[in-house]
Amino acid sequence: MKDAVITGYETSPEDSSTPTGALMEFYRAFNNGDLKLMDRNWLQSDEASMSNPLGGIKRGWQAISEVYHKIFNGTAKVYVEFYDYSIHSTGEMFVAVGRERGHFKQGGSSIELSIRTSRTYLNIGGRWQQIHHHGSIDNPDQLAQYQSAIMTK
Protein backbone atom coordinates (compact mmCIF):
# COMPACT_ATOMS: atom_id res chain seq x y z
CA MET A 1 0.00 0.00 0.00
CA LYS A 2 2.67 2.37 -1.08
CA ASP A 3 0.43 5.46 -1.23
CA ALA A 4 -1.86 4.70 1.74
CA VAL A 5 -1.17 6.35 5.09
CA ILE A 6 -2.70 5.24 8.39
CA THR A 7 -2.88 7.95 11.04
CA GLY A 8 -5.71 6.86 13.34
CA TYR A 9 -7.66 9.94 12.26
CA GLU A 10 -9.27 8.39 9.18
CA THR A 11 -12.71 9.81 8.40
CA SER A 12 -14.07 6.35 7.55
CA PRO A 13 -12.19 3.97 9.82
CA GLU A 14 -12.67 0.26 9.36
CA ASP A 15 -13.46 -1.86 12.39
CA SER A 16 -10.87 -4.16 13.93
CA SER A 17 -12.27 -7.20 12.13
CA THR A 18 -10.08 -6.22 9.14
CA PRO A 19 -6.29 -5.92 9.11
CA THR A 20 -6.45 -2.27 8.03
CA GLY A 21 -9.03 -1.57 10.71
CA ALA A 22 -6.82 -3.10 13.41
CA LEU A 23 -3.94 -0.89 12.27
CA MET A 24 -6.20 2.19 12.28
CA GLU A 25 -7.26 1.31 15.82
CA PHE A 26 -3.63 1.03 16.96
CA TYR A 27 -2.67 4.44 15.54
CA ARG A 28 -5.86 6.02 16.91
CA ALA A 29 -4.94 4.67 20.37
CA PHE A 30 -1.31 5.74 20.08
CA ASN A 31 -1.87 9.22 18.67
CA ASN A 32 -4.61 9.97 21.22
CA GLY A 33 -2.75 8.48 24.21
CA ASP A 34 -5.67 6.09 24.78
CA LEU A 35 -4.43 3.18 26.93
CA LYS A 36 -7.90 1.63 27.12
CA LEU A 37 -8.08 1.40 23.31
CA MET A 38 -4.48 0.17 23.25
CA ASP A 39 -5.55 -2.59 25.67
CA ARG A 40 -8.21 -3.67 23.15
CA ASN A 41 -5.73 -3.68 20.27
CA TRP A 42 -3.13 -5.90 21.95
CA LEU A 43 -3.50 -9.56 22.87
CA GLN A 44 -3.81 -9.68 26.66
CA SER A 45 -1.31 -12.48 27.05
CA ASP A 46 2.17 -13.32 28.24
CA GLU A 47 2.82 -14.36 24.60
CA ALA A 48 2.70 -10.74 23.43
CA SER A 49 6.10 -9.18 22.71
CA MET A 50 7.49 -5.83 21.65
CA SER A 51 10.95 -4.85 20.47
CA ASN A 52 11.13 -1.10 20.15
CA PRO A 53 13.56 1.80 20.52
CA LEU A 54 12.20 2.76 23.95
CA GLY A 55 11.93 -0.42 25.88
CA GLY A 56 14.19 -3.01 24.31
CA ILE A 57 12.37 -6.35 24.34
CA LYS A 58 9.23 -6.53 26.47
CA ARG A 59 7.31 -9.76 26.94
CA GLY A 60 3.70 -9.95 28.06
CA TRP A 61 1.04 -7.26 27.86
CA GLN A 62 1.73 -5.98 31.37
CA ALA A 63 5.34 -5.08 30.52
CA ILE A 64 4.36 -3.66 27.10
CA SER A 65 1.60 -1.51 28.58
CA GLU A 66 4.11 0.11 30.95
CA VAL A 67 6.00 1.51 27.92
CA TYR A 68 2.79 3.01 26.50
CA HIS A 69 1.83 4.33 29.95
CA LYS A 70 5.17 6.17 30.17
CA ILE A 71 4.69 7.70 26.69
CA PHE A 72 1.03 8.65 27.24
CA ASN A 73 1.52 10.13 30.70
CA GLY A 74 4.70 12.08 30.02
CA THR A 75 4.90 15.76 29.17
CA ALA A 76 5.80 15.09 25.54
CA LYS A 77 3.51 14.71 22.55
CA VAL A 78 4.43 11.87 20.18
CA TYR A 79 2.72 11.44 16.82
CA VAL A 80 3.41 8.73 14.23
CA GLU A 81 1.74 7.57 11.04
CA PHE A 82 2.21 4.32 9.12
CA TYR A 83 3.11 4.47 5.42
CA ASP A 84 4.95 2.61 2.64
CA TYR A 85 3.58 -0.63 4.04
CA SER A 86 2.45 -4.05 2.93
CA ILE A 87 0.13 -6.51 4.66
CA HIS A 88 0.87 -10.24 4.48
CA SER A 89 -2.11 -12.28 5.64
CA THR A 90 -3.27 -15.82 6.27
CA GLY A 91 -6.66 -16.68 7.73
CA GLU A 92 -5.50 -16.42 11.34
CA MET A 93 -2.52 -14.06 11.22
CA PHE A 94 -1.26 -10.98 9.43
CA VAL A 95 1.98 -9.05 9.44
CA ALA A 96 2.14 -5.38 8.45
CA VAL A 97 5.60 -4.21 7.41
CA GLY A 98 6.39 -0.58 6.66
CA ARG A 99 7.61 2.75 7.97
CA GLU A 100 6.48 5.27 10.54
CA ARG A 101 7.14 8.97 10.37
CA GLY A 102 6.21 11.58 12.87
CA HIS A 103 7.54 13.74 15.64
CA PHE A 104 8.24 14.00 19.31
CA LYS A 105 7.55 17.42 20.82
CA GLN A 106 8.34 18.58 24.30
CA GLY A 107 8.44 22.18 25.35
CA GLY A 108 10.15 24.09 22.56
CA SER A 109 12.08 21.12 21.18
CA SER A 110 11.04 18.70 18.47
CA ILE A 111 12.56 15.49 17.12
CA GLU A 112 11.51 14.16 13.73
CA LEU A 113 10.97 10.40 13.84
CA SER A 114 11.66 7.85 11.10
CA ILE A 115 11.06 4.25 12.18
CA ARG A 116 11.07 0.90 10.37
CA THR A 117 8.09 -0.98 11.76
CA SER A 118 6.41 -4.36 11.68
CA ARG A 119 3.28 -5.45 13.54
CA THR A 120 1.91 -8.99 13.83
CA TYR A 121 -1.73 -9.71 14.63
CA LEU A 122 -3.71 -12.87 15.41
CA ASN A 123 -7.39 -13.30 14.60
CA ILE A 124 -9.09 -14.12 17.90
CA GLY A 125 -12.85 -14.62 17.62
CA GLY A 126 -13.11 -12.46 14.50
CA ARG A 127 -11.09 -9.59 15.98
CA TRP A 128 -7.48 -8.86 15.11
CA GLN A 129 -5.23 -8.47 18.16
CA GLN A 130 -1.60 -7.46 18.09
CA ILE A 131 0.83 -10.03 19.40
CA HIS A 132 4.15 -8.52 18.29
CA HIS A 133 5.65 -5.16 17.33
CA HIS A 134 9.15 -4.39 16.17
CA GLY A 135 10.43 -0.88 15.53
CA SER A 136 13.90 0.38 14.66
CA ILE A 137 15.27 3.91 14.32
CA ASP A 138 18.17 3.90 11.87
CA ASN A 139 19.69 7.25 12.79
CA PRO A 140 21.73 6.78 16.01
CA ASP A 141 21.54 10.47 16.99
CA GLN A 142 17.76 10.50 16.55
CA LEU A 143 17.48 7.28 18.56
CA ALA A 144 19.58 8.64 21.44
CA GLN A 145 17.60 11.90 21.56
CA TYR A 146 14.25 10.07 21.54
CA GLN A 147 15.28 7.53 24.19
CA SER A 148 16.69 10.23 26.44
CA ALA A 149 13.63 12.45 26.14
CA ILE A 150 11.05 9.70 26.79
CA MET A 151 12.84 7.52 29.32
CA THR A 152 14.13 10.27 31.61
CA LYS A 153 10.76 12.00 32.02
Image (cartoon, rainbow, N blue to C red):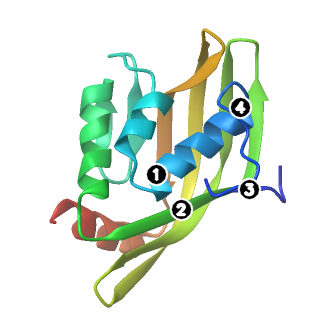
Quickly name the residue at label 2: 80
Q: Residue 148 got which mark? A: none
Instruction: Indicate which disc, 2 or 1, sits on the residue closer to the N terminus.
Output: 1
Amino acid carrying mark 4 in the image: Pro
Split into 4 quadrants, where in the image is the C terminus? bottom left
The residue labelled by disc 3 is 11
Residue 26 seen from this side: yes
Q: Secondary structure at mark 4?
A: helix
Q: CA distance from mark 1 to mark 3?
A: 17 Å
Per the image, the residue denoted by label 4 is 19
Residue in the image at 76% along x and 16% along y: 90
Asked whether, in this view, residue 119 is left or right of residue 77, the answer is right
9 in relation to 85, above or below: below
Question: Which badge, 4 or 1, comes first in the chain's sequence?
Answer: 4
Amino acid, disc 2: Val
Q: Residue furthest top?
A: 125
Quarter of the image for residue 127 reads top right
Image quarter of residue 150: bottom left
Residue 22 or residue 142, whichever sits in front = 22
Mark 3 or mark 2: whose residue is earlier in sequence = 3
Q: Point out residue 24 in the picture as x, y percentages from the top left corner.
A: 64, 45
Type of residue at label 3?
A: Thr
How far apart marks 2 and 4 lie (CA) works out to 18 Å
Left or right side of 35 for 153: left
Check the image and report above or below for 120 versus 65.
above
